[in-house]
Amino acid sequence: MDDKDAIIVGLAELRDKIEHNDFNFSRALEDIHMNIESALTNLIGKPASRLHTARSRNDQVATDFRLYVRDTIDHLMQQIGDLQRAFLKRAEQEFDTVMPGFTHLQTAQPVTLGHHLLAYVEMLSRDYHRFKDARVRLNVCPLGAAALAGTSFPIDREMTAKALGFDRPAANSLDAVSDRDFVIETLSAASICAMHLSRFAEELVIWSTPQFGFVSLSDRFSTGSSIMPQKRNPDAAELIRAKIGRIFGAQVAMTMVMKGLPMTYSKDMQEDKEGAFDAFDTLSLSLAAMKGMVSDMSFNREKMAAAAGSGFSTATDLADWLVRTLDMPFRNAHHVTGEIVALAEKQKCALEQLSLAQMQGIEPKITNAIFDVLGVQNSVQSRTSFGGTAPKNVKAQIAFWQKILST
Amino acid sequence: MDDKDAIIVGLAELRDKIEHNDFNFSRALEDIHMNIESALTNLIGKPASRLHTARSRNDQVATDFRLYVRDTIDHLMQQIGDLQRAFLKRAEQEFDTVMPGFTHLQTAQPVTLGHHLLAYVEMLSRDYHRFKDARVRLNVCPLGAAALAGTSFPIDREMTAKALGFDRPAANSLDAVSDRDFVIETLSAASICAMHLSRFAEELVIWSTPQFGFVSLSDRFSTGSSIMPQKRNPDAAELIRAKIGRIFGAQVAMTMVMKGLPMTYSKDMQEDKEGAFDAFDTLSLSLAAMKGMVSDMSFNREKMAAAAGSGFSTATDLADWLVRTLDMPFRNAHHVTGEIVALAEKQKCALEQLSLAQMQGIEPKITNAIFDVLGVQNSVQSRTSFGGTAPKNVKAQIAFWQKILST
Amino acid sequence: MDDKDAIIVGLAELRDKIEHNDFNFSRALEDIHMNIESALTNLIGKPASRLHTARSRNDQVATDFRLYVRDTIDHLMQQIGDLQRAFLKRAEQEFDTVMPGFTHLQTAQPVTLGHHLLAYVEMLSRDYHRFKDARVRLNVCPLGAAALAGTSFPIDREMTAKALGFDRPAANSLDAVSDRDFVIETLSAASICAMHLSRFAEELVIWSTPQFGFVSLSDRFSTGSSIMPQKRNPDAAELIRAKIGRIFGAQVAMTMVMKGLPMTYSKDMQEDKEGAFDAFDTLSLSLAAMKGMVSDMSFNREKMAAAAGSGFSTATDLADWLVRTLDMPFRNAHHVTGEIVALAEKQKCALEQLSLAQMQGIEPKITNAIFDVLGVQNSVQSRTSFGGTAPKNVKAQIAFWQKILST
Amino acid sequence: MDDKDAIIVGLAELRDKIEHNDFNFSRALEDIHMNIESALTNLIGKPASRLHTARSRNDQVATDFRLYVRDTIDHLMQQIGDLQRAFLKRAEQEFDTVMPGFTHLQTAQPVTLGHHLLAYVEMLSRDYHRFKDARVRLNVCPLGAAALAGTSFPIDREMTAKALGFDRPAANSLDAVSDRDFVIETLSAASICAMHLSRFAEELVIWSTPQFGFVSLSDRFSTGSSIMPQKRNPDAAELIRAKIGRIFGAQVAMTMVMKGLPMTYSKDMQEDKEGAFDAFDTLSLSLAAMKGMVSDMSFNREKMAAAAGSGFSTATDLADWLVRTLDMPFRNAHHVTGEIVALAEKQKCALEQLSLAQMQGIEPKITNAIFDVLGVQNSVQSRTSFGGTAPKNVKAQIAFWQKILST
């Protein structure tokens, strides 16, 4: 058995030991590299002293960390897909449920809940692709850059790169050992994803207040009070809302570490790991919790529909009808609508509760057809432009995503 | 002339006025939308009241800002290419110039200056592709999402998207008006790019000290003292080093703004512009200044070579020779090298100034061939593994990049 | 007239010119220092060439910027006091108004609105003192540190420090020209203050939804829709909520700039101004807007009271009564309360709508006195421990603050 | 024994168990509060059920965390004093050692090393007082605020506040449970302190390059290479330089968490601990390492002196002499100096190596006394203005600090 084979067999044995928690790591040996080499020497003797040929801790640690971040990206992409599927499933159930569409947290126009949920599928899709792009840029192999200058040994970097699943070896040895872009870029993708989660978390916190009452979170994702049965604290949603702090904090930390560092490896870079580990674990936990919450929560359709219909939320529909049907210029239509709403407000009734005569008193050309657009159901059904909230659009979007997300 | 044509002609006229600074913006009209509509009404009368049909400020401002950021990305990508070309040109001139390769800012091994400069071409290439990926994700058109719910007018969103150079219309109206990912992602790409610039800026500050003396910055990019002619303050490099602050600050700001915002548009999002404008302008200025500095600076090859040869920087070469030529295990070679270096240190001479006999006193199998690897020139020439610092590798990389960067 | 007097007279004239916008600044003269010296030379001739004696741009710019930040602090402290007075005035009017006290945005216990408003007076008081402490640390004078080493001229730094309102001259010339702590510390105080404002802003956004309906913002601080009269977008509150982004962004930027800068002055520090100017102006604007909003807004006491009473919000009062009156251990009291609440829930009535007999069915020792604690008014009145929400406590706190805040 | 005494005795016993690692914490009991109460019940039975009277987890956790942060502040203040003493001791030894004073990392004027070291004593003094001020603001006691509204039990909050070492009870119960300013403010003080450490760390990294050679770090704080004996990697300095990243990252995280949180307690706030623990531990470690490094490092006075004298670094002294002795206006003196320096540069000699005749050829009034100011020793001795670098000033400052820092 030559040295190479001895090393391969020895390392395999050590891997098994580590996997079975049967490996004694020694602090005195300083780091993982020396622990392994020392154990290998104990195991196979002299051939172990060839282990470190043509390599350095600098290129090894850069390679190892890329492998870790790559695995993490793969896992997070899987989880993002899972969460998209959870949203999608609920969107299917609620494709025509009417709820208020908010701007400034004020009811603006009725929309469908399915449409609202699909907005998060869109956001998560961007997250997915950001991770995917980061993975492509990450996936070059530093191994063989050695300490910083490359090596004079006739090594085959293409081979080791392929063997480790990289697309290609890094083309510049100095850059290879001093590049930590992949950490920052992946943290940035994680931060934006966490920001999306924080937005839905905020909605859940607001929607689960007694005042809104749009949603009930399951026991798994909220905490009750033994003496106040109606108080359900949306703990999980609040935690997810908060988690962007530590994820983005890790990105700030790493950006600050790399600022103004001269080439090539500096010990400062050792700070790349702990924060990243924590940030990726945190995002993973948040995605899992959000998926559970989305799957478990139950919606109060009556409350949503009632809220959607309040506040003359179909005034825009009325104005659009005037433009579309009476060929009235938009600004005039806007003016007429304002008068009709004022009348309804004075009568303390909804728009659809005004009589045709009352409306004609303001604009004689209005016909009975106007009532087709004043109800919230009619309103959402009319938004059929591409990307609009009409249930049939929502159905089409659901079909689109089902195709993409089926696995 | 129908209303549409009147509007088109009128808007063209207003555009000309604006371009000739001949348009009176009125604060009383609140925003750009109302200023334009009001001016159009003055110009073409009644048809102007149809201008706002099937659109809203919410989708318009989202569209406009995407157009701005897209233009900015295109411009920054161009500038990144320019800076890469500037580095590349200098790398050509210095493909075999020997300098110290640093780890921990301590001389580790000799490298070639051309190789060092190409490391920045690599970094900038990642920056280029990050902007490119961000542009792909950005390039969907919100127009037609209207206020938030889509519209009941039979509009053709595919057509407007294409007309404005977008790849497709945004698929979800709620997401379309509340998405600011493209700002944050582009700021993130800008921050990482600024981090790269800060690293070279730091090197320039250190290299232009009298102690290092590796580089002289031109008068355009440094400031002298009338009474201390040798003091040349590397002002431009220092400013570039600092600029990551405000660029990353803008990213922090925008991430903080978006954290926990419920759907869809909230006024908070109005904060998306000023910080982004400033950050992108700052990066653009930094890229331009760095390009100028890189093109103008002159290197002191003697100082670099002298520094490269100090500190037994070819000890690794000696050890590698022992492994390669005598088939000595790496750890043993390391040990022998340590003894030879200790001898040189004691003799106060460089490694190549030891006699063969002296070295054989430590390891008898050493032959005259050892001297081939002890000089810094020989050292760098030996690093021929892919990505290594050998001049011939540098030349190959230069050829590679010339092909990619020729326009 | 000696040189000194000529300089003094000349500078006074230049100051007047500047104040009357009658001074031509020239970019060619590079900076403010050379513009002044050049203008002074034109005005008074030869004595002007003594202007720069014993000083340097480095100590001058450090001094100037401290003067600016000090003025800013004074102004912000005044504005914080104004906002406290605005909150205090509203607290007086609402000292016994009952509203829901929230944890997790869920009704937890009834509190008084006056108490809630005073919580912000407390936060602002900490902000006030943070600025005050920052001012003490800032208030040392760099003038006379010259370029970095001090000067050999027999200057009186105590005198110039006092003349400029500083407490003392900076004791170390190197530190004097390279210290920018005062910027970062003041930005930090500003960020925390902006965070407090963002919290009340969030409450206003939520409270002004139709679902909550606790507050109506005046027209000055919200924007209506011409066709949806009930939609009032809380624009000012949303903007204030967002502004922490750019204020904290400026702090991040400056911290990043100073990270790892060697002594003493480096050009990087020139980045200290623009971000700080913008951040302080932004906080000033936010404080002013918040003060206006607080003064103008009107509360809907009925909606608040109704919300305060829902959800068995006085269950804790019931439990406390059992402990206090029947000497029941806390955990047992908790258990009994749970049973009573469950009964009320089953009967679909409020706690105070249960009969004594019904409650005695669960715990026989309960007496009629129980009804004293079950109403929300009684509940808040009972919280008389120091710092508690009882109206009489609120009154005492109002008196306390009136004394401190009267000017 | 009444219930109170039983509880006191029981809790004391539990504390002992915990201190002896003899307490079984159960995850099933959810949190620390329930673990303690359950163990107490097992121990003393019924009286334990009174433990939770008049308190809530909300006020308890706020109180506990304040106690922790207060202890941390006390410890960090002690460590800052220790580091100041370490700098002071070295300053004493080097009070008249001449080194180059840098601006833009270029030699500007000679200064004394003692003066340079004292600059850090100044910075650390500001850090000390920032922590001290934060401690004052922190030191109010939330206990008794209960869940959020205060309590109806007749508790004595003054007493519990004093017993726990607080200055006073918090005056507003809502603020008491929702205030996390003390975490952010303490993190801000920690970040600024870490920034100061990063500056000296950067100087150490640069000074320990062979090119500068100003300082040698001891083996404890640097890592050698077995085959390159002159390569000493300044690992500890690099790590300290980097640590500001995670410390400031924690501040970013917490600021982001608190942004826009409505009153009072929200689960988001649970994020206040881990990041703060890590940040404070990190600063503590950095202070300890820096103290060790400062005490251990050895300076190369020859290299420093030689560097201080190069580059006509006393040109300013010459100009000042012309002003002071010949009563020449500053600008004229500047001009004359420029000519003399140009002559020296042409002659390739130092300023003090020019002959009197040569200097008089440029300015006839120059006398032999000029030579008193041209050497670096004379230069630093002349900077006697308060705060200047003259050795006698340094001595006075050392005496000043010794008085303050003696304990």
Image (cartoon, coloured by chain):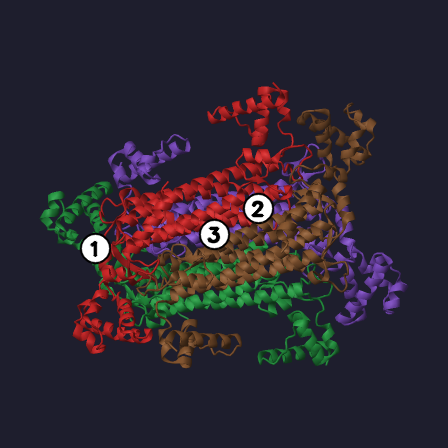
Chain colours: A brown, B red, C purple, D green
The residue wearing badge 1 is: B302
Q: Relative to A305, is C220 above or below?
A: above
**Mark 1 and 3 residues: CB-CB less than 8 Å, in contact?**
no
Residue D290 lies, with reference to residue B33, above or below; the image says below
Circle 2 chain: C
Q: Amino acid at mark 1?
A: Glu
* Drawn side of residue B297 relative to residue D59, left or right: left
Q: Quadrant of the N terminus of chain C?
A: top left
Residue B324, percent across and down?
29, 70
**Element at label 2:** helix
* Residue type highlighted by circle 2: Ala
On the picture, is D233 further left or further right than A225?
left
Q: Amino acid at mark 3?
A: Val
Q: Position of residue A198 (x, y in %)?
A: 61, 53
Q: Are marks 3 and 2 on the same chain?
A: yes
Of badges 1 and 3, nearer the viewer stands 1
Q: Dot 3: what SS?
A: helix
Which one is in front, B211 or B313? B313
Q: Chain of mark 1?
A: B
Q: Which residue is mark 2?
A: C242
Q: Which residue was labeled with disc 3? A: C252
